[in-house]
Amino acid sequence: MGFFKSKLKRFNRDNKQKKNENSEHELRIDELLHRCKESTDFVSYRYSESSPFYIHYYQTIVEINILHQYVLPYINENESNTLFDLQQAIPIDNTEIIDNVHEIRDKLLTGCIVIEVKGSIQEALVISAVSLEKRPVSMPEVEYSVVGPKEAFVESIDANINLVRKRLPIPDLIVEEVKIGSLTKTRVAVLYIKGVTDKENVNTILQRLKEIHFDQIVDSSFINQIISDNHNSPFPHLIDTERPDRVASVLSEGKITIIVDGSPHALTGPTTLVEFFSAFEDYFLSWHIASIFRLVRLFAVFFSVLSTSLYVAVLTYHYEMIPENLLNPLIASRSGIPFPPILEAIILELTIELLREAGARLPTKIGQTIGIVGGIVIGTAAVQAGLTSNVLLIIVALAALASFTTPVYQMGNTIRLIRFPFLIFAQLWGLLGVTFCFSYILCHLLKMTSLGRPYLAPVYPLRLDDLRDSLFRLPFFMQTKRPMQVRSPVRTRFQPKKHEKPKRDIED
Amino acid sequence: MFPLPKEDKMVSPFFVFYLIHAMQVGVGILGFERVIVQSAGYSAWIAILASGASIIGLIWISYRILNKGNNDIVAIHADIMGKWIGGFFSFLFSLYFLSFALVVLRSYVEVIQVWVFPEVSQWIFVLIIIFLAYSYVTGGFRVVTGVSYLGILYGLPLLLVKFYPLQYADYGNLLPIFNASPADLFKASKEMTLNFLGFETLFMFYPFIKDGPKSEKWAYFGVLFSIFIYLLTAFVTFVYFNQEQLKGTIWATLTLWKIVDLIIVERFEYIGISVWFFTILPNICIGLWCASRGMNRLFPVSQRNALKMFCLLLFMISVLLTDRQQIDVLQKVISQIGLYTIYFYLPFLLVLQYIIMKVKKG
Amino acid sequence: MKSKNFLWCITLPLILTGCIPSPKVLEDIQLVQTIGYDYVNDEEFEGTAGSSNIPPGEQSLPVNEVFSAKGKTSKRIRQEIQAEAARPIVVGRVGLVIFNKELAEHGIEKQIDSLQRNPSIGRKLLLVVSKEKAKDIIDSNYSQSDSVSQYLIDVVEQNIEATIPEINLHRFLVHYYSKDADPFLPLIEKQGKHLKVSGLGIFKEDKLVDTISFGDAFIFKILYEKFRRGQFEVELSGGEDVSLENLSSKPKIRVDKRNGKYIATFKVKVNGRAMEGVDLDLTDKKTIERIEKAVEKEITERAEKMIKRFQEMDTDPLRIGEKARQRSDFNRKEWREQYSQMEIKIEAKVNAVQSGIIE
């Protein structure tokens, strides 16, 4: 970690130096143009011999039709030769006359056409004509849901904000934008609903974003890691989601969303541990079913983390605990296996990790085959060769399956990771070791915060109101309050209608 | 001189319930039945009620002192007795809190050694537990409160397991109801009080409670819940064991778990001992926190350094105690000190505070 | 600071690997499932450990393995047995302990003490007294596919449900430690290729003093505990055999003290369905009444006879003394003096209903 920090520091220093150099000698327009011309995709020409206008743009990021239809004809027609007249004539609203060369440069690089007039020294007309390559809005793949909206974020920040704003057509939905990354100049937008969101949370996020000194922000997960409260924690601090509906919903709860250009995942926070185990689909199902599913998921997490380590602990130290009926099958499956339970478990766990990793790296179709072939062939062969016991094989496979029920992918990874310390501790001190490991993780979770808010809420600090939508999901008419976690200034979401039905007789 | 903690370090009054209860239910509950039955037979449950009631009285006294002083014991001592004498008593209190952690830690390790891993030397478990406690206490009082709260939550399912021994219950064991002389009952009550010790930590964490006076009722609830747990445990143990049998059973609750058969798991005591760790961990954490906080208030030393020092001390003493007799002696000594502290020193403090406040005003 | 913590957490266990407990991996230990104790002489006894080896494979059958040794203490015997075993012997999964009758007559205090002191031994452990040498029972083949130990445990367990009173190590200890009750244990014997529960062995403190037959064991169960699913056969005055099935019973003991004299009363309520009356009209109310009367009489007579025997032996396996202790005016010395002569009444109330699928 220390290594990383020092690297970051060094980087920041480099960054500052560069900035200083830039500002030291004032950039002139012709210098800028000269530098740009080094790239072959930079186009720069005078429209005609008679015209006083010079046109510059990067042909790879400019929508050429705009130039052809709305700019060139007017340059031709227009007799005047000032930029102001031209600006008046061109029927595009997004034009500006800028005299700051740095600004001109930025505009040029984000897809604007720069028109310079002969003789003018530091002024240029900037016409926005961005051509963005973007894929259409598609189905969510990571957070798939059977029912409910099928839209997912794409890589374009504008499209993403569009998807959110469409769902929250209120002026209170504020978008604040910052540019981060000394090289990538990534647009990062912070979305929140004014009046509902705690100002302090917004300030925390904005401040942390502004403090980022990094050269490249390629994806929202960069932001997630850099602004997290504890850099050494394996647990994610913000939820990343690809569902605009989820974003709209958490925004109205009073949380904050970060959308990063070029990333199809938005970050939401402050968050809690239990929120990672709630799928957005829970809200589309009736509350009984949703509550049960949440509990099942929570159980799956415990099962996934603890099952193999308990197997190792019991088989290595606590044979007394195995019930009579299970004893003989267990011994039969174990006897003849050359490895102690811990090695057996680690080998199988690693095999599963290999399968998962291979499946994730390969194209979808091959990945599936690998999963099936690997799972069936390797598993059966290992058991038949007497290398592992079939009981453990079942347990490991179930544990892996259980870890995939976690709706948030990042959390699923964490869960698979923390299995290994449990395994080691189980081998060292049996059940007690598992307890020790568990209490260490508990300590970590208790100390953890997300944007300065406790991570284990609403369990600790206990907030009974918040429990309505965490471990369980109670019916909507009971969700009248925003979670305490977000410290919203307006806690009530809506006034519940009195649910009083007059008591009628059976046949009335 | 003694500043109050910052608002964001405080916990709501409601958590006093857990803090008090967590301190009272520790390692003692695994084997307290034998001790009280040896003095008062199966009428010993009366002793639980009696000593519980006296503890409620003492909590009332504590709150009178604390509400008036509106700070922790160190500040109150300094107010009443001045810097030097008060400081001396505060120092003793700090050591007293540390000794709680010591007794609980060492007794739990003893249980591990007898029941689970007889061949492993104690120091390794002492070390691990101290390390864990250290990492909790460095999280501050909020984290310590969190672990007491979660520890109780994890411990509660153990109560359900009491259902299994009840299948072998002989309710007649409890009869005749009053079968002990008042002297025996008094002795048993005295012994029972030792199990209720630990609420004195209130004197250290009181300033960390948002709106301290409001927490009084939660403190009472905490004690009531402890009484309930002890009564329930004693009841199940009494109907399950024969009186003579119980007198020879050192860890009645652990022996009781042996009969539990959960279909997928037999011999519940191994699980029980592991889960019990979450009940004793808060004891050690609160003890260490109070002791180190006291040091920090008394001397110009950071709480972290005081904590490190105490952890080292705790480790060394725990390792030096090698056999059961020594642990028993330790337990006896600490509980004697505790007994005098709560029954004599606290009322004395209340009176002294009252007088001095009067004098100062007048 | 935090990263230091993390590092510690990882390296600590590695440095300290020398301090981890020695593993007892399931297949590397010899799990003893039955223990037998036989009498040798007043000082020594013989211990037999029955266990099984399970060869690898899914359908493999367990192979029986028996170790035995003589010695003065259980520890000594264990050491001797260990010497001849291929793997470390562990007793944490013992399900049945067999005491030879001869040993039981000389007292089993030593063995019981070592059982209850060992923390790895459970409390659901079954204890029995055998007519034959315990070693012969453990070291023989039965016509079962299960392991011998499992078979022995199953036989005893099955009987505990329906025919003999429930007793395990915990119950035994409760009776054994009680000042006002004495323990009892099931009695087993070998019959050809089978094991049979043949009654109860009655103890006085730790010594076997008497045995009662299988039939009486059921009467004992009726007097001793509440249960369901029993069966009882009786011969009517006319010589017809009738059986009561699905029998449930609930005993109640009352101990009164009148003029310093203790009187005990057993009130037994028995419900059951009358079956198998070949020549009887079971729909007739009178027949049912006759059956009830006959069963009542049978239970009362046999119970009285049995209790008389206990009184003669001055042993109290039915915990009448415990019941007396619950009186506030209980005096143990008086009770001890009076017990063998005191009056013990049996009041049986039988309620039979006709059933069966043929009228």
Image (spheres, rainbow, N blue to C red):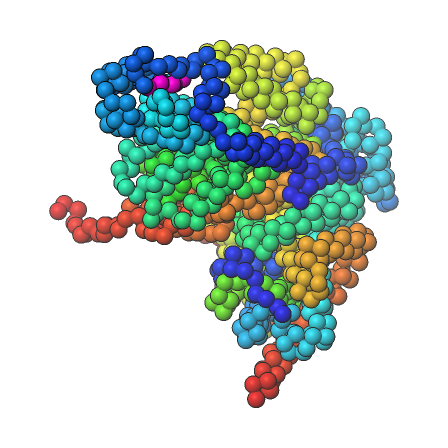
Inspect this view and state whether residue B247 appears: no
Q: Quadrant of the N terminus of chain C?
A: top right
Does B330 appear above or below A255?
Answer: below
Q: Tell me the residue at 76%/44% (across/down).
A: B124
Q: Residue at x 38, y 31 (%)?
A: A99
User: Is A260 on the left-hand or right-hand side of B107?
Assistant: left
Q: Is residue A55 magenta?
A: yes
| Residue A293 covered by magenta stretch | no
- The residue located at (65%, 35%) in the rendering is A6
Q: Residue C14's spot in the image, x, y percent?
A: 74, 35
Q: Which residues are magenta?
A: A53-59
Q: What kind of secondary structure does the magenta stretch mostly adopt?
A: strand
For the view shown, which residue lies furthest in the left direction?
A508
Extreme residue in the bottom direction: B362
Q: Position of residue A224 (x, y in %)?
A: 50, 35
The C terminus of chain C sits in image quarter:
top left
| Rendered view: C42 above or below C262 | above
Please state the horizontal and vertical placement of residue A308, each as a whole percent of the image: 60, 30
Q: Residue at x 57, y 25 (%)?
A: A396
Q: Position of residue B234 (x, y in %)?
A: 59, 59
A301 or A126: nearer the eye? Answer: A126
Vertical placement of residue B74 versus A391, above or below: below
Vertical placement of A300 versus C170: above or below? above
Quarter-of-image position of residue B21: bottom right
In this orientation, which residue lies closer to the viewer: B156 or B337? B337
Q: Which image quadrant for residue C42?
A: top right
| In-front residue for pair C210/A148 | A148
